[in-house]
């Protein structure tokens, strides 16, 4: 048995609203051990909604709808579902009374259009909405099909799910197993290269391993189905250990870890400090670091040195080197790192200078060319050249540059 999530709303198709409901329900289904293989988004159109229903009942036994339960003419979920199964809608006076009371509490008068929300398919149970006006339903139109409907407002849907849907599903025998996942994170290796290294793990039945990639980072999700979290952990841990050994330094953390949080842990453990000097990232590196709670323990500050006068005046970059090699160069990156480390009196200095685009490139220095400088505690200084390419776009070049700088520092802290 499996579930399918069906989100109704033209605004979702247009991208006007982020579909957070599907993510929430997917996570909740995993906690109940209910597999789901499909998610569908459909607009406020009865014919297309019926087509979605026809497909969904052929491949899932639990159908979970969100959206389309409001009072306006385009809110068609309940009536379309009832029509699909050939069942009449029945008006429930207790729903009208509940909506009326809520309007009164808010100092308003219920409009006639809200009576539409009291129409429920015959035989369906009411799924009460304690905060909004749109109730949902729990309905088994056929012995092998269970339908839930929820409003599209996330706060209302969350409460209805937790207070009504979860107890019902548990009463039907679900929740005896969970699907628990751990996400392993990697930097400095491409998705295909990592996939080749760990290919045999993709064929495991339980736990399962699947790759994901985005913004320069690669992830491997390890999921296990078991009676409890501890039992799932026991299945995951041996596989996790083996993958970490294969990946080596390319593995940096898991689940909620970030490159910035891992660097912070390493600096805190060694009682060392960091300062940064940024050009093309415009403060993005400092932002990543300060998003970590308690980062003031080890991160002392930074300089955003867009103009060359700031590189010279604040960071001590040699103006002759700027004239000869340009701001986007290895020697300038090194001097920026040394300069910020010296002036802020930190253990480490980390710098970034590059061309994020879309303008500023030359024949020898294309968009995506980035230099990262690193000055260490023993007055050593190194620089690294990267060519992130023009297809990534400005925002992604800046993000990848800052993340790569953090990863370089992480590797230095681990291997010195």
Image (cartoon, grey):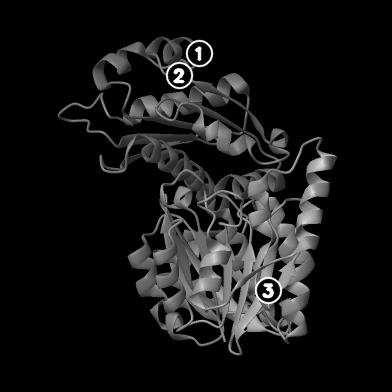
Mark earlier in primary sequence (3, 1):
3
Residue holding disc 1: 314
Taking the spot 26% from the left edge, 33% from the top edge, the residue there is: 367
Q: Which type of secondary structure does the marked residue at label 2 adopt?
A: loop
The x and y percentages for residue 404 are 44, 44
Is residue 284 toward the left or the right of residue 257 in the image?
left
Marks 1 and 2: CB-CB under 8 Å? yes
Image quarter of residue 116: bottom right
- Is 161 drawn above or below residue 11 in the view shown? below
**For mark 2, does the 10 Å Cα neighbourhood hold few (<14), some (14 to 19), or many (20 or more) residues?**
many
Taking the spot 43% from the left edge, 16% from the top edge, the residue there is: 311
Farthest residue to the bottom: give it.
143
Residue holding disc 3: 138
Residue holding disc 2: 305
Taking the spot 45% from the left edge, 84% from the top edge, the residue there is: 58
Q: CA distance from mark 3 to mark 2?
A: 60 Å
Q: Between 254 and 377, which is closer to the camera in this rendering?
A: 254
Q: CA distance from mark 3 to mark 1?
A: 66 Å
């Amino acid at each position: 048995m499996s579930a399918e999530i069906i989100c109704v709303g033209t605004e979702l198709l247009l991208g006007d609203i982020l579909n957070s409901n599907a993510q929430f329900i997917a996570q909740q289904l995993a906690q109940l051990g209910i597999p789901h293989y499909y998610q569908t988004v459909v607009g406020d159109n009865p014919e297309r909604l019926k087509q979605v229903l026809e497909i969904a009942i052929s491949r899932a036994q639990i159908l979970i709808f969100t959206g389309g339960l409001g009072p306006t003419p385009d809110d068609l979920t309940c009536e379309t579902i009832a029509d699909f199964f050939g069942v009449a809608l029945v008006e429930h006076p207790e729903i009208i009374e509940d909506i009326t009371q809520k309007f009164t509490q808010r100092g308003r008068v219920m409009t006639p259009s809200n009576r539409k929300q009291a129409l429920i398919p015959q035989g369906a149970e009411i799924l009460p909405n304690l905060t909004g006006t749109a109730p949902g339903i729990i309905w088994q139109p056929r012995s092998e099909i269970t339908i839930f409907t929820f409003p599209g407002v996330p706060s209302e849907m969350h409460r209805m799910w937790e207070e009504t849907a979860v107890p019902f599903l548990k009463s039907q025998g679900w929740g005896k197993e969970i699907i628990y996942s751990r996400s392993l994170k990697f930097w400095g290796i491409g998705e295909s290269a990592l996939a080749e290294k760990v290919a045999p793990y993709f064929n495991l039945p339980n736990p399962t391993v699947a790759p994901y990639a985005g913004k320069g980072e690669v992830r491997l999700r390890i999921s296990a189905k078991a009676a409890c979290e501890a039992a799932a952990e026991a299945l995951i841990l041996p596989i996790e250990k083996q993958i970490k050994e294969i990946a080596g330094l390319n593995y940096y953390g898991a689940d909620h870890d970030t490159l910035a949080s891992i660097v912070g842990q390493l600096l805190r453990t060694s009682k060392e400090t960091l300062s940064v000097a940024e050009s093309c990232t415009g403060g993005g590196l400092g932002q990543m670091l300060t998003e970590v709670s308690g980062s003031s323990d080890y991160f002392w500050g930074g300089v955003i040195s867009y103009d060359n006068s700031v590189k010279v005046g604040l960071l001590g970059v040699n103006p002759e080197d700027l004239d000869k090699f340009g701001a986007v160069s290895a020697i300038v990156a090194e001097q920026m790192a040394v300069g910020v480390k010296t002036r802020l009196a930190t253990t480490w200095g980390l710098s970034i200078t590059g061309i994020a685009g879309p303008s500023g490139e030359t024949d020898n220095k294309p968009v995506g060319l980035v230099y990262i400088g690193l000055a260490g505690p023993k007055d050593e200084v190194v620089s690294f050249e990267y060519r992130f390419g023009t297809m990534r776009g400005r925002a992604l070049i800046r993000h990848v540059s800052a993340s790569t700088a953090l990863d370089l520092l992480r590797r230095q802290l681990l291997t010195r």
